[in-house]
Image (cartoon, rainbow, N blue to C red):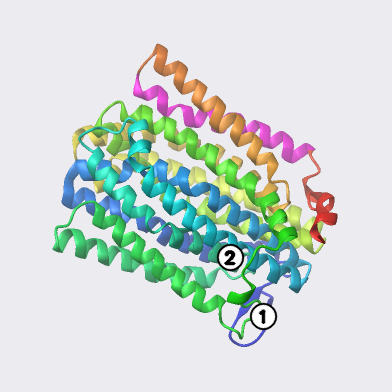
Amino acid sequence: MHFLKADGHAATRDLTQGNPYTQMVGFAMPIFLSQVFQQLYNTADALIVGRFLGTNGLAAVTSSGTLIFLMTSFFMGTAMGAGVVISRYFGAQERRQVSRAIHTIMALGLVSGVALTLIGVLFTPLFLKWMQTDPEVLPDAIEYFRYYFLGSLALVMYNVCRSVMNALGDSRRPLYYLIFSSLLNIALDLLFIALFHWGVWSAAVATVISQAASVVLCMVHLLDKRSEYAVQWRLIRFHKGMLLQILHYGLPAGVQNSVIGFANVIVQSQINSFGKLAMAAYGTHSKIEGFAFLPITSFNMASTTFISQNLGAKQYDRAKRGARFSILSAMLLAELIGVAHYLLAPQLVRIFDTTPGVVEYGVRQARTVALFYCLLAFSHSVAAVCRGAGKAFVPMFVMLSIWCVVRILYIMLVMRFKGEIGYIYWAYPLTWAISSVIYLIYYLKADWIHGFETGRAAART
């Protein structure tokens, strides 16, 4: 593996050289492990709350998951756009542009974190009531949600820092920092809930403290003056031309994430109408599925960085080889995981809650969707390729039309005429299949490989 080093302290990885397959796997593995520990944040909350505070507490924590994703996904998508811009200039070895992009996304992250805190804390009751949250669960859900969003700045800034480091080919440091903060989160959950017997809100406090710790570690590294791309407080500001580029590539990803989040909120609100057992089961399934899909997410993140760097260096054939490898690997992993999830669904749900009704709902959902994970992986993989190639509007339009509009229309129709929860579960494989067909046609027919060429003039602004 080839590394570009500014000095002995900081290292960045150049993904434009060496064997593309081993480079991609080597870059994806730390991302995968960091994703595992990131997933431990919310899963530890759900697991410990479910064990010590019962089904009501579990429903309160898990019922807010889709709403949290909706509120944060826009900013996370924008950070992904910054990663594309940074990777492109890093591949082209345009150091000044890399530095400007880093300081611009830092400024955007600080502003976004403050805005998200205000929105999340102020409008929590309104959002949860709109989602038809069970009145028995609502007080705990409001408490958990509000405390969680008090840490929005840390949540946004960690994802900004991780995006910057990943774009520079450094996927190891985010892993180390996340291991520490995830273990801290679990320890605090046990301390606050199991030992102190505090309420559901304390799980959110533990998460906030842990996220803040990860941001501190990230910033200590990024502020180190020995690094070639060190962050300097005095340089953190909005560079107009760079901000426009970041928004050009990041807003579509943010909108894409938001419309998926919005559609999932609609699904969650319909699930909530079936009561707290269905709520707890749906949230539990989401936690399990989140872990199950981590290898695929890791390949997708690696693919975006790999393709951006190689297209920035004009290594088009290498980018194509990396795209094919990431798509096929993600689909294979997804289907293997899906089979395991299908077979082990009862045991996995019981880890969180042994209530028979929760287990029944959870197993039913798992055995409806798990064998179709390969379609979900394909859609996400091609979307990652598009983002890496500067074609971020393509996945945005596909997700908006299929994963949002079609999914919502389907659910509204089946709930009107059938009113049975099993039909809601089928919304996912149905929309995954439709989007996969569209993405396959685009991947085979479109000239995605020259996605950055049309934006060359804007890049020099």
Q: Residue at x 31, y 26 (%)?
A: 273
Q: Residue at x 55, y 32 (%)?
A: 403
* Residue 259 image point, x, y percent: 54, 37
Q: Which quarter shows the C terminus?
A: bottom right
For the residue pair 456 and 375, the one nearer the viewer reads as 456
Q: Quadrant of residue 244?
A: bottom right
Identify residue type, mark 2.
Answer: Met
Identify residue type, mark 1.
Answer: Glu
Q: Residue at x 29, y 26 (%)?
A: 274
Q: Is the magenta region chiefly helix, strand or loop?
A: helix
Q: Which residues are magenta?
A: 420-445
**Is-magenta flag for residue 279?**
no
Marks 1 and 2 close (CB-CB < 8 Å): no
Mark sitting on residue 106: 2
Q: Quadrant of residue 192?
A: bottom left
Name the residue that disc number 1 marks. Answer: 228
Q: Which quarter shows the N terminus?
A: bottom right
**Is-magenta flag for residue 431?**
yes
Which residue ends up furthest to the top in the rendered image? Answer: 417
Position of 72 compared to 302: left or right? left
For the residue pair 323 and 248, the one nearer the viewer reads as 248
Q: Residue at x 22, y 32 (%)?
A: 357
Q: Nearer the viewer, mark 1 or mark 2?
A: 2
Q: Is residue 320 above or below residue 163?
A: above
* Residue 329 image point, x, y percent: 59, 51
Q: Secondary structure at mark 1?
A: loop
For the residue pair 185 and 30, the one nearer the viewer reads as 185
Graded by Cα atoms within 10 Å as few (under 14), some (14 to 19) or many (20 or more), the crowding at tag 1 reads: some
Of pointers 1 and 2, the one earlier in the residue sequence: 2
Graded by Cα atoms within 10 Å as few (under 14), some (14 to 19) or many (20 or more), the crowding at tag 2 reads: many
Give the spatial CA distance, label 1 vs label 2.
17 Å
